[in-house]
Image (tube, grey):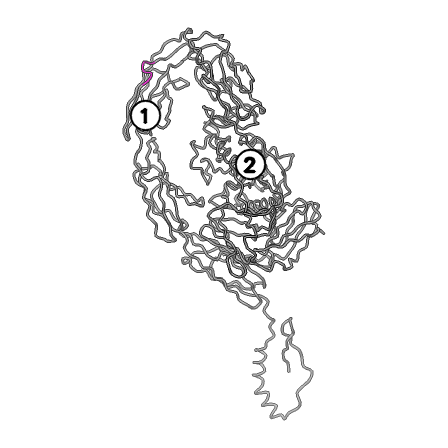
Amino acid sequence: MYGCMSGGSDGMACHGRDRLPQPISPRFQLAFLRNSIPLLFGALAAVGCEPNPTTGTIVLTIEGLPAGVPVAARVTGPDNYATVVPATGTLEGLIPGEYLVRVQSVTVGGDLYTSSVTQQMLNVAAGETESSTIPYALTSGSMDFTIAGLPAGAAANVIVRRADGFARLVPASGVQRGLGAGSYTIHADTTVTAVGDKFGPSAPQQTVTIAASQTPVPVNVAFSQTTGAIALTLSGLPDSLPFDPVTITGPGAFALGTTVSATLRGLSPGTYTVSAVSAVGDCPTMYTTLTPSQTVDVAVGATADASVAYSEGVASPAELNVKIANAHVTQVVQDSLGTVPIVAGRTALLRVFGLANQCNTSTPPVRVTFSNGTIVNAPAGEGSIRTRLAEGVLTSTWNVAIPDTAVKEGLTYYAEIDPDNAIPELDKSDNRFPATSVRMVNVRTMAPVGIHFVPIALRSGQSTINSSNADQYLSFSRKVHPVATFDVTFRQPLTVNDSISGPNDINTWIRIVTQLDAARVADSISSPTARFYHGIVNVPYNGGIAGIALVGGRVGLTWHHLPSASATVAHELGHNFAQEHAPCGGPALLDPGFPYAGARIGRFGYDAETQTLKDPGIYADLMSYCGPEWISDYMYVRMMDNLSNRQTLPMVAGASASEPMLLVWGRIVNGQPVLEPAFEIAGRGQLPRPGPHRITATATDGSEAFSVAFAGNVIADLPGDDESFAITIPASMLRGRTLASLRLTARGRTVSNGMSVTVNADPRATVTRAGPRAARVRWDADRFPVVMVRDPVRGEVLSFARGGDAVIVTDQQELELNFSNRVHSARMRRPIQ
């Protein structure tokens, strides 16, 4: 007879039995066999010879989505297991271990559905079935806009804003969907039609609260015309005059020069003055008028008339008059009144604008007297004094270079044309500028700006940035930014266990900038610094994403391609200096206050290195996506203000020079918060910048240990309003309790991190040499999903390694490893074998 016996851990084994039963009578033996054979086969079937189960199962249930809508649920687990589950289903044949289920928000017909369970850890055992239910719910609402009062074809200037930085332009009536629940402000601004008429809103601002619902909230925005027009008729002037002898001025600092008849629309109601001056034609021709000044009243919706007639004549040399019409000091960009501040300790250029009232061959010098007693005689740059301003021609002005040592607060000057009275003229009283006293130059002292360049080491390639090529990356920034000096330092490579797959790999760029920001915060704990961290990324393409940065933060990334990378670095630093985009080239995150159409620079720029001017009709602001690039006075002053007023974070009351801190970091992508594993580090007790997001800690006894509001930094140069954050929270806020979990709430969604294992569990780590400047770190990633690898000598973070096997760029013989179980972390030092 054959039977089955337990084979221990290897399953069931079948063995032959050597001993037979004792003899029995044939009749009884036959009956025994007849009755026993079915039982024996039943017993064999019941016991069986099949092996014990070695795999498990996950049943994934998706609830709350409309029928037929797919969801991208991603499941990852041991042995690099990864799959995407589009709907409720069963995963079979799974190796025992921990499996992480992650889901993202889903958009259906413009409505947003999100899950309260964005990630879930399941422990799959052999022969067992684990179940996971992912509940979805509608989390967005909508607004039904009715925009009235505008002419047909006119686009409304209506913007929907939320406190966290979300903004959407609404150009016409209709339903706006996908709006997260919460309070919104509706900003309605003046709309200009194609012909120039202006229509203003009856209510420039209103507040609307949106709930999660498919029923739109009605929003009414009414416009009405607010302007009138002037029909101006000019006669007696040639078509070829190179300047505008007729000027119209009026309410709201309106000023316009012209040489032709035209209907001027979009004028605010009020009284306007039409001024006409003599005009110089082809020498010695002059054009004069008998109506040098007249006033016109403009009413809303009406068109007023004005006319100016000129007659042709010949200039008389005896009536020559020379004057200084204007003067200003420029460094990078300047308006005609010289109101843009200049930076102390940086060379500048004084331009003196001399004018004559008729054709001439005079070339008098201009004498400039500075507040420090220096007197400079500047020669004429041309063979005659111009009869009209030509700001775009550098030689048309008398120019004085001011050395960097003389550019300091308190700088003044005055200028005199023909100081020795060598030219006979009608009036000498207008030869001095200013007419009395001195002109004060607005000089600001700016602190040096620290730039910490960081080579980024990716699986797809490593960049190189050091003292030999740093000037190439910073050359454009040195020209255009309101900075006296850049203090440049270099950092070891930050290894990111990732690859950029192509020109539009947005997610990898976001992961890199998030890790660089966390590294910056962790670095500053051991070596306090206010430097801007700028990573250089080696990319496998020549056209695509070239850079991203945190708006108002201290981190940016730029691709490695020179020379274009120089302008990209300047652009990304502009974001770090808290600036959004100028409107050209289709960028997201527009600055609604940018004053110049087409993102033009608005005022003449000046390149001190090449001693050339930048035409405001040609050059675009560097914060746009258009070129050629320079900087506008608007962005220049705003960046200067940001750098001057940049504040440090407040210290925690009673904080010591160094105390235990918790590094909490992550990002918000497509509205979905991501909370990375936290690390325990040592540093000074600073509170994060207050904002709309919140980190909440739960202690092991179930109580709330702390709850901290904070603000992230919007990631510029990507579509949408993604954010990154890296903050430190003093461990003293736990008040002696043990941390059990962390919860992040942002954009109406919540994610949590719980302990994957006790923090004192063995990470099973090995560190071996992988090359002359590389080390291979291997550990149990199921227990500790991320390890902060730090240089024990320099104190710099070398990597946030994940996946259990990572090659780190380093020249050290030892590494500090800080293993995180998502909530806590434990440090150890390991020599590189």
- Residue beneath label 1, please? 263
At x 55%, y 55%, the residue is 735
The picture quadrant where one finds residue 225 is top left
Residue 833 included in the magenta stretch of the image: no
Q: Where does residue 582 sit, x and y in percent of width and height?
A: 46, 35
> Looking at the image, which is closer to me, 470 or 292?
292
| Amino acid residing under circle 2 | Val
User: Whole-percent x and y of residue 142?
Assistant: 37, 49
What is the secondary structure assignment of the residue under circle 1?
strand
Q: Say whether residue 243 is left or right of residue 416.
A: left
Q: Which residue is mark 2?
A: 569
The earlier-in-sequence mark between 2 and 1 is: 1
Asked if the residue under mark 1 is in contact with the one under mark 2, i.e. CB atoms within 8 Å, the reply is no
- Seen from the viewer's position, the closer of residues 43 and 442 is 442
Q: Quadrant of residue 268?
A: top left
Is residue 264 visible in the rendered structure shown here?
A: yes
Tell me if residue 420 comes above or below residue 614 in the rendering: above
- Left or right side of 59 for 811: right
Q: Is residue 318 left or right of residue 442?
A: left
The residue type indicated by label 1 comes to Thr
- Whole-number angstrom distance, CA of label 2 to CA of label 1: 45 Å
Q: Which residues are magenta?
A: 289-293
Q: What is the chief secondary structure element of the magenta stretch?
A: loop
Which callout, 2 or 1, points to the residue nearer the camera? 2
Q: Residue 164: which disc? A: none
Q: Position of residue 146 (x, y in %)?
A: 32, 44
At horizontal 65% and vertical 54% (from top left) the residue drawn is 778
The quadrant of the rendering that contains the N terminus is bottom right
The answer to whether residue 548 of the structure is visible from this angle is no
> Dot 2: few (<14), some (14–19), or many (≥20) neighbours within 10 Å?
many
